[in-house]
Image: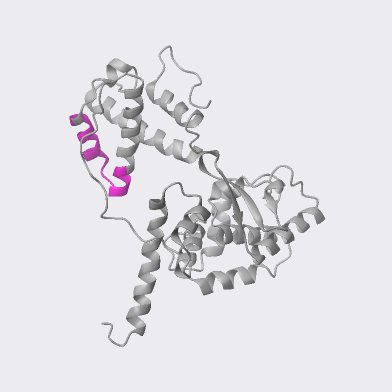
């Protein structure tokens, strides 16, 4: 366990909580890191302004009240979505402490940071993403074929970056066009893919075998034969998306946004898109409807004779 090493005599309550999220709830490393950052900021604030460590023990935790929490949120500032995430992190932490009987009630006040600054996800245009992929598949070097395959899988399957990195050779079924995806919380799903994704996967496997790369370590490899890592995938995607200047961000997640939006634009059922994305809650998928509806409004405005 990464959170329980080199502890003092007492067991820090925040570390105990993080171990619970990792070992019991099976949260992803990215999610756990977000919780850890929020708890660390709260602890530093309370220590600095109220002169006690809230996570040292149950006695200290019981000193935390609604006034302290309100002061923290006023201090933290930031976007409403960021504040809402911090509130959710602390609320989840205090709920866990109630279960352990370290406190009797949650000190989180009734504050709402919902709405106000949510944006429609930035997505690539269909014609431009198709042109990019067509250009990439004409190259033959190991690096070029691998990059093309990464793009085809991210866009063609709507994967998260962590899901792409976790792919193993045995997860790929080209004959039946199915991919075993290992999602959040160690959940698995079978993801169908199209002919161009199958073509890219086959080309990548062939170039790996031709040049002696060992796919038993991981499916996607660096030129040195090592498994990919998050920053590598980010830099690769950003390099190819840089010409699309209208994108606010050029990260792997943009291809996931683009996958979902393009499906909905072409009439895909929302529940089907939810399953393809591996979302646990339909609310996570509904955000893509806003992008789809925005496009329909633009079409209506440009095409209807009585549109203003």
Q: Residue at x 51, y 39 (%)?
A: 185
In this rendering, would 267 be left or right of 177? Answer: left
* Residue 4, horizontal then vertical, whole percent: 49, 22
Position of residue 211 relative to residue 105, above or below, is below
Q: Residue at x 76, y 46 (%)?
A: 214
Of residues 270 and 284, the one nearer the viewer is 270
Q: Could you tell me what secondary structure mostly forms the magenta stretch?
A: helix
Q: Quadrant of residue 133?
A: bottom right
Q: Could one spot residue 305 in this view of the protein?
A: yes
- Residue 82 lies within the magenta run: yes
Q: Residue at x 66, y 45 (%)?
A: 227
* Residue 287, horizontal then vertical, whole percent: 38, 57
Of residues 44 and 297, the one nearer the viewer is 297
> Which residues are drawn in magenta?
67-84
* Residue 179, horizontal then vertical, whole percent: 64, 52
Of residues 2 and 182, the one nearer the viewer is 182
**Residue extending farthest bottom:** 305
* Residue 186, horizontal then vertical, whole percent: 55, 39
In this rendering, would 27 be left or right of 97? Answer: right
Q: Quadrant of residue 17?
A: top left
Position of residue 147 relative to residue 55, above or below, is below
Of residues 235 and 145, the one nearer the viewer is 145
């Amino acid at each position: 366990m990464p959170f329980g090493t080199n502890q003092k005599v007492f067991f820090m309550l925040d570390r105990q909580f993080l171990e619970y999220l990792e070992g019991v709830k099976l949260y992803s490393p990215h999610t756990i890191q977000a919780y850890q950052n929020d708890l660390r900021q709260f602890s530093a604030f309370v220590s600095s302004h109220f002169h006690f460590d809230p996570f040292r023990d149950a006695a200290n935790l019981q000193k935390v009240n609604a006034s302290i929490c309100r002061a923290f949120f006023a201090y933290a500032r930031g976007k409403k979505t960021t504040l809402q995430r911090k509130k959710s992190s602390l609320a989840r932490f205090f709920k866990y402490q109630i279960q352990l009987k370290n406190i009797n009630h949650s000190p989180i006040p009734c504050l709402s940071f919902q709405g106000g600054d949510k944006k429609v996800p930035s997505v690539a245009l269909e014609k431009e993403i198709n042109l990019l992929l067509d250009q990439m598949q004409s190259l033959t070097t190991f690096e070029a074929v691998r990059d093309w395959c990464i793009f085809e899988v991210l866009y063609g399957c709507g994967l998260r970056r962590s899901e792409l990195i976790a792919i193993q050779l045995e997860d790929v079924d080209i004959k039946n066009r199915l991919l075993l995806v290992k999602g959040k919380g160690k959940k698995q799903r079978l993801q169908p893919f199209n002919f161009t994704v199958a073509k890219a996967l086959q080309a990548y496997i062939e170039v790996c075998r031709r040049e002696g790369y060992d796919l038993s370590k991981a499916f996607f490899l660096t030129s040195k034969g090592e498994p990919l890592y998050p920053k590598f995938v980010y830099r690769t995607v950003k390099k190819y998306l840089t010409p699309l200047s209208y994108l606010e961000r050029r990260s792997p997640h943009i291809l996931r946004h683009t996958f979902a939006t393009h499906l909905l634009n072409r009439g895909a059922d929302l529940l089907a898109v939810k399953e393809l994305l591996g979302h646990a809650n339909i609310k996570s998928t509904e955000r893509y409807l806003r992008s789809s509806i925005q496009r329909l409004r633009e079409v209506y405005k440009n095409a209807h004779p009585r549109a203003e």
